[in-house]
Amino acid sequence: MVYVALITGFLLILMGLYGALTNRNILRMTVAFSIASTGTHLVLVAVGYIPGRTAPILDGAVTAADASLRIIDPVPQALVLTAIVIGLGVTALMLTYAYKLYETKRTLDISKYTDLKW
Amino acid sequence: MVSTLFIIAGGLGAAFLLGLLREEWRGFAYGVTLAALAFMSWVAGSWLWAFVFDGAVGVDVFTAGHNPPFAINLRMGLPEAVLVLLVNAMGLMVGVYLKGTLMRLGRRAMAVLLVAVLALCGIILTRDIFNLFVFIELTAISTAGLVLLSADARALGAGFKYLVISQIISILLLVGIIFAYHATGTLNIDGMAEASVALMKGGTLAFFLILMALIVELKPFPANGWALDIYESAHPAFSALFSAAFSAAMLFAVDKVLLIGGEPWPKIATGVGIVTFVGSNLLALSQTNDRRLLGYSSVAQVGLVLTVIGQRAVLGEHYLFVVGGILLAHSVAKAGLFWVSGLVVERQLSAWAVLRQNPFLVFAFATFMALLIGLPPFPGFYAKWELVHALVSEGRLALVVFILFGALLEVGYLFRWFGYIIKREASVESAMSKPVAFLPRKLVVIGVGVVSAWGLGYIWGALSDFANVLQALPVLFALSFLALEGLPAKLKNTLAIVGLVAFFAISYENYNQLQLIFGAIILIGGAVILLASYETHGKRIGFYPSAMLMYAGLAMLIVAEDSFSFFVAWEILTVGSYFLILRGKFSEPHALSYIIFSLGGAFAILAGFALAAGGAPRIPLEALAQVPATLAPWVFILLAIGFMTKTAAIGLHIWLPGAHAEAETDVSPMVSGILLKAGLFGLMVLLLNMGKTQFYGVELTYVLLWIGALSALLGNLMAIFQEDAKRLLAYSSIGQMGYAVFGLAMMNHLGWLMALMFVINHYVYKSMLFLSVGGIAKRTGTRDMYRMGGLIALMPLSFIAVLIGIIAVSGVPPLSGFGGRWIFYNAIMTADARLPMILIFLSGPVAFLYLFRLIHTIFLGQLKDEHRRLKEAPFWIVVPQMIYVVFLLGFAVFPGLALRRVDAFLNPYFPNGGLNWEGLTISSDFGYWSPVSIMITIGVIFATLLAWLVYLNHNAQKVKQFNIVFAAERPYRPETTHFAWNFFAPYRKALGFMVQPFVTQFWDGLTGSLHHTAQFTRKLYTGNGQTYAFHLLAFVVVVYLILVGGLV
């Protein structure tokens, strides 16, 4: 199970990067990066997963006393939440940029935005 | 102490507060922003104060009531305090600079600025790897926001490219972090470092990804196109922050993270760093856009710091001193230059000529340029010295070569740019918008940068193990002229003369005989030449600080006792003389080649000293004698090359003719008569201490002998084909210095005596001739000799000076030149190098050919029509010439005044073959020389001939100019019909092959191919964001392959 999640995560990262490098449309690139980010998040969670254990939430089912034996590693879960929030921010910013860029040249083709070079 | 957390909290709190304000309260919002930045700077500053003055120790700040690894901790130590202060102060300055833009865009833009600054502080302070990721992402988002401050529409594209890159970085970083966490069980950087032994194969890969993500943030060559686009299009104030503060923070992050790794990682840092340093500096050569050029330069400097970070183990306790010196110098200088660029309207480099409207801005540019390059007295200078010594002692010679090569490229494009500022005309559009509105607020920000630059120089001098350059009396004297720039030139001139003479008066008692000769030439001789400067009017801004800096360097050079103080003096005199040479009207390209050759030579000297020091931070100059035999020839070669860039030995001479000929009238004698002696002094120090040295069986002094002989012959040959009188004199200097080098290389008593005599003679007659010719050129408006003629009656004093001068130069009796020759012929009788000796003999008559032209073409023949009303050269230009005439006559009769002391000085070094001084007659093993009787004999012959000519004068037939019969044709180039044009055409036919500009072609070819490489390689940066992303991924893969391939 862990490996399935890990491999899926990495596949998503590679797909995302491939998409970002091959699609010239800025919106498609943004989507591709979102896919890659999702892959990263999956990898994060998968690394923290320990087979046969439960979610790191202390309630009636899991008490503080036996938590260390029964729950999976909570740190990656905390990390992934942060990463998701940041990823959302960056995606939003990229979309804003896409909008602004479209306003200047009426195109979303990234290869048209090469005024700065050399 | 205020808790470190307040730095983060202050920024964050103010940013939230801004969100609550009404949109219209812009002034208040701006006030809140500045107050927050000032508060954050104050907290950082108070920590720095505590560390430095109260001896505080570093503290960790814990959050969330737990110790790491269960909670994030921030650390505040001395390096953190310095960097956080840098980031906050930079933020504050940028805030001030950006007032107009921020007031226009409102509180949101201000909040983004605050977030950027606090995120950078977070990167520096945090010890938690995931927290580091969060702050890096915050930085990325705020960067993408701040890029939009620019009015340039292209910034949008640059910002998007940056976002693409930051997405890839965040993927690398996250994957790296999670697997590193998996391998070590902690997110704490120090915890990971402790667990580093436990890092297994997977952990290594994880660490690799983390490191790569951070390094990519540092814009490594060639995966840095995105950064260059940002630099080019962003608001300059933001670029300042991006270059100075972002890079500093990210470099510190790399430094922290490298704690985790083991053996190969620092090598990766060094490898990536040095490729970036050299590559980016190379590509910068062909840049014409100012901000993009600054971008290339930023990237390069960060590469240098990364290189040094990788060499941490080698530097040991000096690590912080070196890395801090380079980093802070880069930050302040680059921020300053970006701020200045905000004042310039157009983007091509030559548009910066508008800065000339405000001398303060020129000074600011020069300060930032020197700071960036690492010239004394700035921190980079001390850092460079320590770095090169440490690397050489560890045998990392290739790295030293690359660093110095990259630095020389940087010297090239920065000084070229400075030349544009001083010499180019501002374009029509900028000229129309005159006077350029330099906003006082922006000037204040730039002023803060300048003050910080000098302050850092002082601090680094105090921290170093050496004497503080900014406490040396001569340097302070020279710099004090900066404060006096508002005074009239004549007053400053008096101060300068008094200063030189007074310094000689207080120091001559401590000089030995050799130093006394050089000291007298530099200080007293310098004062005599300065008499000619009374001729100038107005304020002459920039002249006195430069000239005094050169004299300060020279005065410090001759008393230097160890390698460090010698090198400091060498660089100071080089820089001062560069500014001086650049003042000439058409000096721009010549001053540039001068500084490149000189600093290239200085780097050779640096490497030579480092090699000789063998791990010590510096050595007394006498210790050159104890260099182990395996290293000695290399030290000898490096130092000799360095010194011969100044004496303009053949091959390294191409800067001299232009630099000396195009310089101002009173500057030519300074840089010819005095400055060239610095190289000779260096060679003397070298030869006195190292003596004869074998290099694979070749005697190096013998090579010097050949170089001297060839310089003498070719220098003189080139001189005879000049039409320009000052160029003629300049080429003649190459030949004269060749004689002196030859004399020294003979390594016997008389050879040295002759060289020292040359030192004195060359100063006197070259200064005199340059002044006469300069005075004549001032009156006639041309330096071409064939445009002159018949000036003997109009300018009799100049004529006398030139006549005496050429008699002295050519070495005919009765003047001191003959004494030089006499000693010289005695010297070569005792030496055994026959072939170079023949060359030297040959060059003697060649000198006659060109010297003769000075009299013949300028003073004799027919007066040109347009010159009929000319007056004698200006009074103050004639005064020093007459002093020289008197001195030459006196020195001719009583050469013993100076030479006897020198003779005695040389005795311990070369005990055999000295001269006998009895009464007024001087005798050697081969004959005797009696100056007084020679003078009388010549005087009698001269008087007789003159009387005879006067007697014949009534027979003479006057020829009027219009007696000439014209052919009915108007020549296409009138000068071709002048008898004095191409005067030595037959000789050119015979010997012309020897003066083909092979050397010039060689150096042109070298610089040309560098430019072509740069031009070709920079096409790599296509401007397409996807290409840049591909570069990045390819970069990571290539570094990985190098790593697993075990190449490091």
Image (spheres, helix red, strand yellow):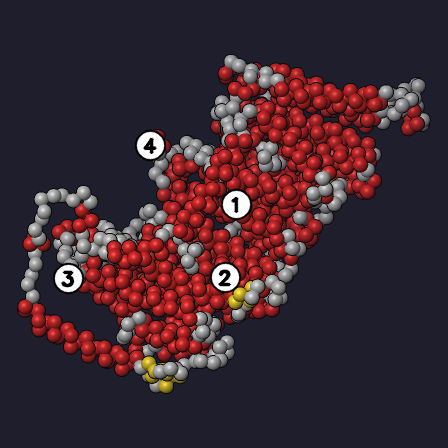
- Mark 1–mark 3 CB contact (< 8 Å): no
Which sits earlier in the primary sequence, circle 2 or circle 4?
4
Q: What is the quadrant of residue B949 in the picture?
A: bottom left
Q: Quadrant of the C terminus of chain B?
A: top right
Mark 2 or 3: the one toward you: 2
Q: Vertical placement of A111 versus B349: above or below? A: above
Q: CA distance from mark 2 to mark 1?
A: 27 Å
- CB contact under 8 Å: marks 2 and 3: no
Q: Amino acid at mark 1?
A: Leu
Choose between B30 and B685: the one closer to the eye: B685
Q: Say which residue label 3 marks.
A: B793
Mark 1–mark 3 distance (CA, rounded to whole Å): 54 Å
The reply to the same-chain question for discs 1 and 4 is yes
| Three-letter amino acid code at the position of disc 3 | Ala
Pointer 2 and pointer 1: residues touching (CB < 8 Å)?
no
Q: Give the side of residue B307 with respect to residue B354, left or right.
A: right
Mark earlier in primary sequence (2, 1): 1
The residues tagged by marks 1 and 4 sit, at their Cα atoms, a distance apart of 31 Å
Q: Which mark is residue B640?
A: 2
Query: Which residue in the protein does label 1 denote?
Result: B372
Check disc 3: other Cα within 10 Å, few if <14, some if 14-19, many if 20+. few
Q: What x and y, as percent, mark residue A18? A: 67, 21
Q: Chain of mark 2?
A: B
Q: Is residue B559 above or below residue B335?
A: below
Mark 1 Cα shell of 10 Å, populated few (<14), some (14-19), many (≥20): many
Residue B991 percent coordinates (x, y): 32, 57
Can residue B81 be seen here?
A: no
* Chain under numbered label 1: B
- Gap between marks 2 and 3 measured at Cα: 47 Å
- Tell me the number on the disc at residue B428: 4
Q: Residue at (49%, 52%) from the top-left corner?
A: B600
Tell which tag, 2 or 1, sits nearer the viewer.
2
